[in-house]
Image (cartoon, rainbow, N blue to C red):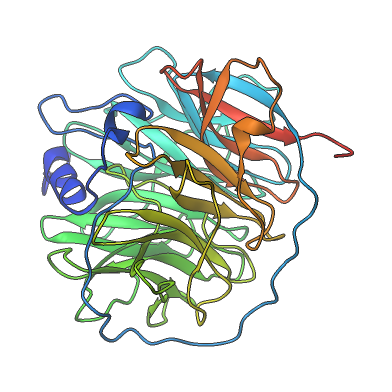
Amino acid sequence: MKTPRFNISTVTALAVGTLILIGSIAQAQLPKTFNRGRGSERDDLSLTNRVPKPHQGLARPAPEPSMPQAPPQVQYTVIDLGTDAIGNGITDSGRIVGSHNFGDVDRHPTVWPNIHSLPIDLGILPDGIGGRGFGINPRGQMVGYDYTENFIRPLFWSSPQSGPIELPGLSGGDGIASDINPVGQIVGTFFDDSGFRPVFWSNSNAPAIYLPVSNDFPNGQAFSINAAGNIFGDACTADFSECHVAFWADSMSTPVALASPGGDFIITDVGLSSDFTVAHALNDTGSTVGFAVNPATGETRAVFWASSSRPAMILSTSDEFSNGTAEAINEKGQIVGTAFNSDFSDPHAFFWPSPTSPGIDLNTVIPAGSGLEIAIARSINNRGEIAGAAYPNGQPPAHAVVLIPVPGR
């Protein structure tokens, strides 16, 4: 057995010190905690109030894709995948990865082979307490993590029946695996007593390597990797007092800081929480999504970058739900995320048919009388199917859901 370099409370302190929960999101959002005297963990959406200084020194490259045009507004049916659960990723074939409570202390990494399947427990390592499934590729390979009293470990599953494999680490490093692309390349984050480092695995058997960082921004996290091997995450100073959304063209490249939308919203980042929330925020054309913050007021806005060389564009929401973050984008440029009211007490899942379209509250385009309040949208596939979570009659525990566009609308 390896000797712990630090425990869950160390990781939680680092995360919470950087990713401060706003208002009552901590009360309103998804799952259970695993504090057990060691702090707390959540895999729901929360936002940061980092206040960066003017950006110093991450380079910027070039070309940008054309802006997709919005299709007509759609309606959705809602598939309830089960209670005390969340859907984090969905493939074009309709496989969903996430987490579900099968009656244990905490939720386990979970896969639904299709939208009509019962949840399958992907399993955790023998000494694990709980875990999460985050990324899934077209081959059905999946990544996520589990945790014990002392370790958080990046895991890989080659299929629903394969059982978990701990991904090779760096000096026994603890961490999570966030995403896996079609060729099996994986990204995630390692932790130690000094901070966070973004990491890359060329495949599930290869040792992790650290992604390049700058001297000014030695900390960071990697959330999303596309088919071309582009990587999306963030880069932070040693004390986490300043962070920027970061883009790596590949695992060996210098990170690029993505520009803010300007005006009052000068901070940009990815949808984050104290349990290192996944964000499927990068598509194969290199377009990305996240959020921007006004440091004077704490207001947030969902934002879109057409490419790493373009400034962020603020996505429209509504007067009531003006705060929020964009969490996923597909190859058609369709975007999903979560918007909040003024005090962040009421999360509503939102959909943008294109970056230039008005945002649509998903609760307005599902059948009346469903009894579900769609709170979180985590992933969208190229068929427009959306994975996330909802509250029955607005009350926890959350249910994992998939929203299916209605044909002909």
User: Is 22 drawn above or below residue 202 in the view shown?
Assistant: above
Give the tally of numbered discs. 0
Could you tell me which quadrant the N terminus lies in?
top left
In the image: residue 325, left or right of residue 81: left
Residue placed furthest toward the right: 408
Residue occupying image coordinates x 54% and y 50% = 317
Residue placed furthest toward the front: 319
Could you tell me which quadrant the C terminus lies in?
top right
Which one is nearer the viewer's eye here, 387 or 199?
Answer: 387
Residue occupying image coordinates x 19% and y 80% = 216
User: Is 200 drawn above or below residue 250 in the view shown?
Assistant: above
Residue occupying image coordinates x 35% and y 63% = 199
> Residue 51, image x and y in percent?
21, 64
Name the quadrant containing residue 241. bottom left
Which one is nearer the viewer's eye here, 379 or 91?
Answer: 379
Which one is nearer the viewer's eye here, 392 or 285?
Answer: 392
User: Is 52 drawn above or below residue 91 in the view shown?
Assistant: below
Residue 285 in sight here: yes
In the image: residue 357, left or right of residue 230: right
> Residue 263, image x and y in percent?
38, 73
Which one is nearer the viewer's eye here, 261 or 401?
Answer: 261
Residue 172 in sight here: no
> Residue 232, image x and y in percent?
45, 65
In the image: residue 220, left or right of residue 355: left
Residue occupying image coordinates x 36% and y 30% = 29
> Residue 43, image x and y in percent?
36, 37
